[in-house]
Every structure is written in C-alpha cells, then in structure tokens.
Image (cartoon, grey):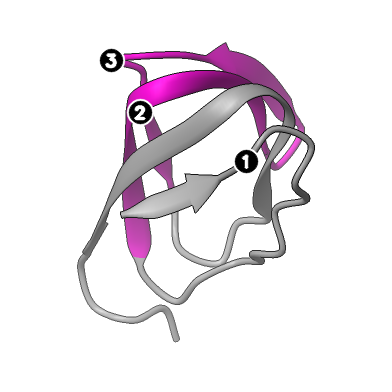
Amino acid sequence: MYHLAVGQPDPQGPHTRDEVYYVISGRAAIQVADERQAVGPDSIVHVAASVDHRFHDIIEDLDVLVFFAGPPAA
C-alpha cells in the first residue's frame, strides 16, 4: 500500500522491477517518463523497471495498491 496526502510530494524514483499501480481512492496525476495522466479510483498504471515516475497534483488523499513483478532490471 502506498499513501500520499493532499499536497504531499511523492519522493519515489525509478525502481528495479516493473510496477503496476491500482488506485483504490483519491485523485491525482502521475507522470511516467514523458507521459502524464490523471488517476482516480480504479485507475491502473503500468511502470516499466528503471522508468522515472511520480504522482503529483494530489487533490484527494491517494491510496494505491502497488504490485512489483519480474526480475530486477540489469
């Protein structure tokens, strides 16, 4: 589980494994590499290993279920 409050910065950086985010509640935007998209309840976002990504513009407290998968990136 990953929780970010309204206005809280997202300190995460690239990870060594692929990730899938499932938004349980809240509203924000996510930047994945050069692509930005709005997210809200039931949004699903895939982030490949080693890709820069971050939630921002959090307008409702965000609760996200995070899945890591695959072998670590070399």
Q: Which residue is mark 1?
A: 5
Residue 20 placement (x, y as % from top left): 31, 44
Please identify the quarter of the rendering in which residue 41 is found: top left
Q: Within 10 Å of the Cα at label 1, are there few (<14), some (14-19), or many (20+) other Cα atoms? A: some
- In the rendered image, the vertical position of residue 74 relative to residue 43, given as above or below: below
* Left or right: 26 as drawn, with respect to 32: left
Density class for disc 2 (Cα within 10 Å; few <14, some 14-19, many ≥20) is many
Q: Amino acid at mark 1?
A: Ala
Contact, mark 2 vs mark 1 (Cβ under 8 Å) = no
Q: Secondary structure at mark 2?
A: strand
Q: Nearer the viewer, mark 1 or mark 3?
A: 1
Q: Secondary structure at mark 1?
A: loop
Residue 23, numbered circle: 2
Mark 3 highlights which residue?
Answer: 42
Q: Are marks 2 and 3 in contact (CB under 8 Å)?
A: yes
Choose the circle earlier in sequence order: 2 or 3: 2
Residue depicted at x 36% and y 69%: 17
